[in-house]
Structure formats: structure tokens, C-alpha cells
Amino acid sequence: MDKKNFVYNRPLYIGWLIKMAWRDSRRSRSRLLLFISSIILGIAALVGIFSFSYNLKRDIDQQAKTLVGADLVIESNRAVSAELTPLLDSLGNDRARERNFASMIFFMKNQGTRLVQVRALEGAYPFYGDLETSPSGAGRNFRNGRQALVDKTLMIQYNAQVGDSIKIGDLSFVIAGALLKAPGRTGLSTTIAPPVYIPLQFLDQTGLLQKGSRIGYSYYYRFDPGTDIDKLISTIQPRLEKEGLDYETVESRKRNTGRAFEDFAQFLTLISFIALLLGCVGVASAIHIYIREKINSIAILRCLGVSSTQAFLIFLIQVAGIGLIGSVIGAACGILVQQILPSVLKDFLPVEATMTISWKAIGQGILLGFLISVLFALLPLVSIRKVSPLLTLRMSVEPGRLLRDRLTWLLYAAILLFVIGFSRWEMKSWKQALFFTAGILIAFLLLAAAARLLMWMVRRFFPTSWNYLWRQAFANLYRPNNQTIILVITIGLGTAFIGILYFIQSLLINRVSLSATGNQPNMVLFDIQSSQRDGVAALTRKYGLPVLQEVPIVTTRIERLNGKTALQAREDSSSQIPRRVFEGEIRVTYRDSLTDSEKITAGKLHGPVKSPNDIVYISMDENYANRIHVKIGDSIVFNVQGVLMPAIVGSFRQVDWRRVQTNFRVVFPTGVLESAPQFHVIVTRASSSEASAHFQQAMVRAYPNVSIIDLGLILSVMDDILSKIGFVIRFMAAFSIITGLIVLIASVLISKYQRIQESVLLRTIGASRRQILLINALEYLFLGALASVTGILLALAGSWALAKFSFDSHFSPQWLPVLILVFLICLLTVMIGLLNSRGVVNKPPLEILRREI
Amino acid sequence: MESILNVSQLGKTYQGAGRSLKVLDNINFSIAAGSTVSIVGPSGSGKTTLLGLCAGLDQASSGQVELNHIRLDDLSEDQRALVRNRYVGFIFQNFQLLQTLTALENVMVPLELQGEKHARSRSRELLEKVGLGDRLNHYPAQLSGGEQQRVSLARAFANRPRILFADEPTGNLDVETSDKVIQLLFDLNQEAGTTLIIVTHNTELAAGTQRIIRLKGGTIVSDEMQHQGQEPET
């Protein structure tokens, strides 16, 4: 060969590299699989959520018609004007209508009373799907007589049977059936006021339709197939909007339901993604130690002429292969998660979820798992390129030291970009994606910093006079190949998750419970007519209950804001007025003083209006004013049930909305609204649930139209909702915790290879089985305590910030459950650690050396 | 006679924390193709460092090494790896076999790296030659020290190297095994016509080579040709 022209280029021999990767992995496959197992749960959770979401999206599309029950629904919060009625009566090929309102019902058999949503129905609604009832025919037949359909849960609660009677207002109805499911109603929306259906023809006789009552009007339409409903809507929309009517089509329901669930699914996806990230950190750490063990082999290969790229590729192929296997296993487990999700989420699902396997979700999960595991594993893998063949001669010079590489920083950047990219894809917003990534990064950094600090403190301050076993155990926390940082991050983040969920849940419950103690009001009576006001107050006092507050309520809408109508505001692109200002109703009151839950923050509260020519100065809740961009001195024209009422914003109030009492976004002065249609609210306090029940029965008998909200009911409903949501979140957060435990098991097994020689040495020089076990137990106890306490501290800080800045609430955590959580995590860590060291202590040292080394 | 290894003004200095340590200083020699040479000296004299530099495992701080007419100091680590694969064989004190590969696979590696089609049959042939025909599929952990070093010998000769570096090849073996391995090494070397450079403490082993270079404190203190070589007394 011509030495001068020695060619330094040679093929990579990919086939040989794959063969070498395969050969080299022979004795490490089970360990590699264990390393990669930490991503399995993350992938499983993601594939489960993806798959479930895709199915649900399809289900919503397919079932949207039965969700709405009609092709078009038009809704109004007040009686439709005479001009619009002919239009509403001319739409559709089939029509039905409904009036709905909150009212008390009275179970005749056991004298029980309960706030319900009365739905008085006329026509063949629902046109698609059914009012599902037991017995099954009741959904159609109840319209034939004075019969009602009562929500199934309510019937169970009040021990009511089909055939029993209930009283609504002045009229009694026979229960024709238990309502199992009605179009568009999911569990949560009907918990506070469960639905009761009656035929519309009997509504007048109940006596509940009085002036000022808050009644919803719904018109349902079915159109023959082929009708262009969107086109129809676009022609009638201006008239509907002018009258303040809402409409809903199958398409708009699809969008809204889909959107609402997307937010929830997105939240769950991000929780799963965090589990995946935790797993990946575990993978990176495990591969790091794996590569350290392989340094000698790499040096030999380099000595024999393997190039740095070839050496790197041999191990990359191993990791990629095992990453692919892990992702496939994860995706397979994801199918199982998908089967469980509907039962976990059943209370939140708008439609019946189907369970077909989504290949798209599986593909995405595998791709994601493969990419992210390789990306994280590359962090330790790139160091292979720097392993010197000289290590074959001088292993003692550089004992397994991996050199830092500029490429490492590039990889960190790539990982960061990947996380931002994934969150952007999921959240559809760069801002949110950046916040999410920054949040994760900060949590990781804080936990890593805490671990480093504690390692430093143990090293610096641990008393050298302590017993050898303690010193040995604590020294293991900072010695080479320690797993302290990785375990504190993974277990700590999982603990922080669970901790924050728990703290916030109890914060919310406590906030409501607090209101139920002391002399705070706990019962609100509403829909009281002006003529009934004195009688209701007298009856309240007769039952020994105080009338804590008595306020009139007038329903209004904003007609013009600073001279602009809804239409003008929409057409003016420079206008800052949000569209929702003109939508919906505002319930206002009138008085000349503040309540103890209010204080003036700007302007001043004006006194009574004495002459019709006086300017009407209103007071507005400052948060509401900020939301709709209103300043002091702005002019607003209110529509008080047909009468236009100009007013000027005279003051802003800060309102404590948490109190159980009537609070108002807008307060009028006296002398303006006294003769407007209105109803009254009385706030009282019942000292016991018996007193409350007796009072409610008497009130419903005497004033059937008066509705009562019992705080005890709200509390139990809220508790129920929060625990259901909490369960879902805990279910997903469990993936993070279990991932943390898998990383723990993997780390312990890795350290087993690291520590085995030392344990054998200790045994050889005479350490007893008990002493070695104690060293291990202390080490893992401290690791578990460090990780869980750091996690809890993070949770406390996070919950405190949420309480202070989001919920504006005082944060006082309960310590007992926190201590139990810390104890459990420590126990688990110690158990895993000890189970693993059992093999070392139960066998003679020589046998272990022969087998393991 | 053609020279296979030229070393001139070679020096190696390690930079430590605030101070530097000169391990080799102004080393000059040339080795003829096909000859056998031992590098001897007390611990810390720089023998292994010199071997590492000559074999292209490390880079010199000064001076140059020319192996098979290729200047190693001009090359990158990957280029030196290619040179090693083509022209160099290694035998180590602690055998340095890949633990996850069988004996046969260990021998095949240098050949497979060259894309050699008959890697398996040649490796089997070599292992049979060193008396391990019945141990082809054993892993290193299943072989004795002597057997492992014989696998190492087979691997060292597999790629038909022009020059073979041996670092204390008998350092981890008992006397009896050690004699057998030395015999085998010299036999194979003679048969292949390879240049052999041995770093050793073993005076008997050194006596079997044609030339002895003695190092002390990082410099050559003597460089002697021996009257008889090649055939160590066993």
C-alpha cells in the first residue's frame, strides 16, 4: 500500500454496528429494559389519553344530534316578543317548546323538599335520541297526563317510587318514571338542581309563573334532511340577536362540547407528559451509569480501530432499539389505560365513549416515546465519542470519567425545544407552551438544587464522630455514582404533584366549610314576589330563623355602553367593548348603603334619586368593570324588562364574593327601580339540618314558588365535584408517582452493581448481615425523606402561591396527611432498597463475586 | 533493513493542578521491520506511556512518531484508529477482551472492522492455532487467565498487523502459563513476520528479544542489541 496516500475514509459498516450492538447488549438486555421501563407509564398515559380523545371527538361528532335532541334550539331568558313569535312558529318541520326554571318540589310521601330545575315540555322533543327513563315508555307517555319525570338520583335520595306524587307549586303530579338521561345533560350540570320534566299544559296551574320569575324559554326544531340550517341561521340571526335570543345547532354543540373536553384532555395530556419527562430523566441517568460501565469496552474497541462515530453508533443503536421496545410496550399499556379512562371520567363525559383502538394515537405515542427517550439518552451517549483508547493501558488515570462536551449543551437545547414544541402542539398557544416549559424547568431546577444543597450539607456538616454505619449510609448520598439528584427530582416532582392537588382541594372545601360555621348565613330564599316579601320574612322569623339580609333583585340587560349598541360595538373594529357585555342578563339591586362585604375603591356611592330628571349614578364591582373596560363616568343604558334606563358609573366597589349572601355586580340607588318587575331574596341561617328541613317544608307549603338554596347542599355537591375531579387528576398524577418509583427501582438496581463490591468487601472483613442492611436502610430512608420533603416543600410553596394569587385566600395546610404521605414514600423507598440488597446479604461473599462481577 | 517505527525527540508532559509532570523526554529510536524489541525499566519510568505514544493511543507533547511511514502526530484520533486497525496489534496485561462477546467474536472484531469476508473462518483458524478450538463460543468470564490471554493473542494477529505492541503480556499469569503464552507469542510472531515490541518487567521475556531499550526517569538509559533472541528459554 502506498503509505503516502493512505485513505482515511472508510465505510461505517452499519450492518456490523447493528451486529455489535446486539452482541454487546447480550448481558445487559434485562437491565436496559428496566432503564427504559420508566418511560413505559408516561407513554401508556399519553397513548391512553390520545386514543380516548380521538374516540371521544368522533363520538361527539356522531352523537351530537342526540346531545342537542334537535336540529336547532333557540333560547331566551324572557318571554319572546309578539313580533318575533310568528317567526319562531314558522321555523322547522317539527317544533317543540319548553319553559324551565328553578323551583322547590315537595315529595308528598315523606315530606321532603328539594330545589330542582323544572322543565315544562310540549311537543315531541327530543327529535333525536330519547328521554331515557325507567320504565322505558315514560319518557314519551308522561306528556299524556299530570305526570312528571324525576331525576333518578333524586328519587333514590328521597326514596320515591314510580306512582308516588310530588307537588310543584300548587299542583301535584304523579311520578311517571325516573329520568336516567336527557339530551345534553351530563352528571355535573344537574347536580345542584336536578331536572324534573312536566307537561307544559299544566304549568300555568302550578301558579309558579309570576311577574319577575326567572324563566328560561326554549324552542326546539327539527328540519327535514338536506335543510341548510347555517344559511337559515344567517338570515334570522340579526333578529334573534336584537331580541337577545341565543341559538344552538348541532354543529355549534359539536364545537362547544369538543372544545370543553379538549381543554380537559389537554390538561390530562400535560400531566402524562410530565410523567414521560420524569421517566426520560430516569432513562438519561440510567444510561449515564450504563455507559460508565461500558467505558472499558469502548476503549478496547477504539484500540482495535473502531472510530468514535462507530463506537457512539453501537450504543445509540442499543438505546434506540430498547427505546422503541419501551415505547411499543408503553403504547400497548396505553390501550389498557384507554379502557379504564371512561370509567374514571364517566361523570364528565358528554357522550357515551366508544373503545376502538386508535392506531393514530398508538403511532404518535411510539414516535414520541422513541424520539424523547433517544434525545434524553443522547446526553450521556455523546460522551462516548471522547473515550480515549489509552484507557486500556491506564484505567486508573481516568476512572470512568466522561468528559463534558459542547454537544451536550446543544442536546439540552434540543430537549427544551422538543418540550416547547410538544406543549405548543398540545396547547395551541406559544405563550402557554413557554409558561408550561418554564414551570417544568423551574421545578426540575429547584429539586436538583435542593438535592445538591442537601448533599453538600450532609458532606459538610455530618458529624464525623457518629457511628460508622450512619456515616457510611450518609456518605452513600454524595459519593460517585450516587442517585440522589435523580431520585429527588423524580420522586420529589411526583410528591409535589399529589401535594398541590391535595392542598388546593382542601383549600377550596375549607373555604366553603368556613362559611358554614359561626353565625354566617347558610340558606338563601329566592324568587320571592314583592307581595310575598313580608309573609316570607314573618314565616322565617316564626321558625326562629333570623332574616340576615333582604334584598330586591331586578333583572336587566345592558343596551348601550358609552352610546354604542351591541351591533355598533361589533362593527367598530377599534372598540374595546367585549361582545359579552351585551349578552346575558345582569341582576341588580337598589340601595343607598354598602353591605359589610363591600367597600368603595373609586368614586362615591350616590344617595337616593329624588326626581325623574336626576342623573342615576350606579356602583359597579371593580373586577366586572375591569373586565368590560368601564371607567368612572362612563354612561350605560340598561334595559329593565323593556324600559330603557340611562345611568352613569358613579363608583367602583370591591366585593367579597365568597360570602354566602347576595352580592351584585351593579347596585342602583333607591328611587329608580322600585316599581320595576322584581323578586326578592332573603338570607338566613338555620342552626341544624333538622331546623332547616322543617323550615323548608313549611316554606314550600306556604309559598310554593319560593326556591331555597341550602349551603349544606352546595357543600356536599362541591365536595362531590371536587373529589371527582381530584380523583381524575390523582389517577393521572399516579403515573408520575409510579414512574418515580420505577426510576427508583432502576436506580437501586444500578447502584446494586456499583455497590456490590463494597458490600462484599464489608462482609469479607466481617460486617454482619444486620449492619449492611442497616447501612442500606438508612441510606434509602434518607433518600426517601429528602425526596418527599423537598416535594412537599415545593407543593407548599406552589399551593401558597395559588392560594394567595389565584384564590385570594389564606393558606393553612393540614399537616397530618402530609406527614402520612412523607412516611409512605420513605417506607416504599426503604422497602425497595432493602429488597434489593437482600441478595447481597443472604449469600456468601465469594458466590456473589463469582456471579455478579 | 526497512524501519517500521521511527521515534524522534519524543516528549510527553502531563499538566496537573498548577504544575506539569514530564514523563518522557527526548526519546529517539528506530525499529526495523520484523525485529523483536523489549522496553524495560522500573515502575514510573515511562514505559507504558511510550508504548501508548508509539501505538497511536495517545498524542505526544513534543517530537514525532512515524509508524509504517505514517506520521501519527499529524492525525486525528479517528485517523489513528484506522491506522491501528490496519497495521497494529495489541496484547494487554489484563487481556482487555470484550466481556459481552464470545472468544470467536472477540477475535473477529478487527477483521469485521476491515470488512473482511472470511472473518469467522480466519478467527476460528487462529483460535485453533492457540489451542482454543473447543472454546470458540465461551465468554471471557468462562475462560482461565491463560486462555483469555491466548484469545488476546489470536485477536492481536487476526488483522495481520505489521507491528505488535504487548504491554506486560504475562503480568497477570502464573509462571507455567506465562511460559506457554510467551512461547506462543514468539511462535506466532515468527510465523507472521511481525515486528514485536514488548513492555515488560520480566527479564526472561526481555532476554528473548533481539533488542532491549531501557528507560529510567523518562529517558533512554541504554539501547542494546542482543546476540541471541527470538527463542526465549522455557
Image: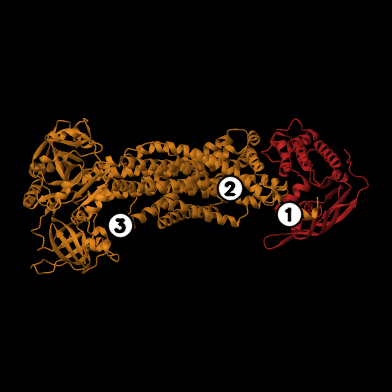
Chain colours: A orange, B red
Instruction: Classify residue A699 as left or right of residue A846.
Output: left
Crowd rating for badge 2 (residues with CA inside 10 Å; few <14, some 14–19, many 20+): many
The residue identified by callout 3 is A808
The residue identified by callout 1 is B58
Disc 3 residue type? Asp
The residue identified by callout 2 is A288
Instruction: Classify residue A93 as left or right of residue A781.
Output: left
- Residue at the image position 9 percent from the left and 69 percent from the top: A613
Number of numbered discs overlaid on the protein picture: 3
SS under mark 1? loop
- From this viewpoint, is residue A514 visible? no
Instruction: Classify residue B127 as left or right of residue A122.
Output: right
Q: Nearer the viewer, residue A66 or A339?
A: A66
Q: Position of residue A82 (x, y in %)?
A: 11, 52
- Residue at the image position 12 percent from the left and 58 percent from the top: A642
SS under mark 3? loop
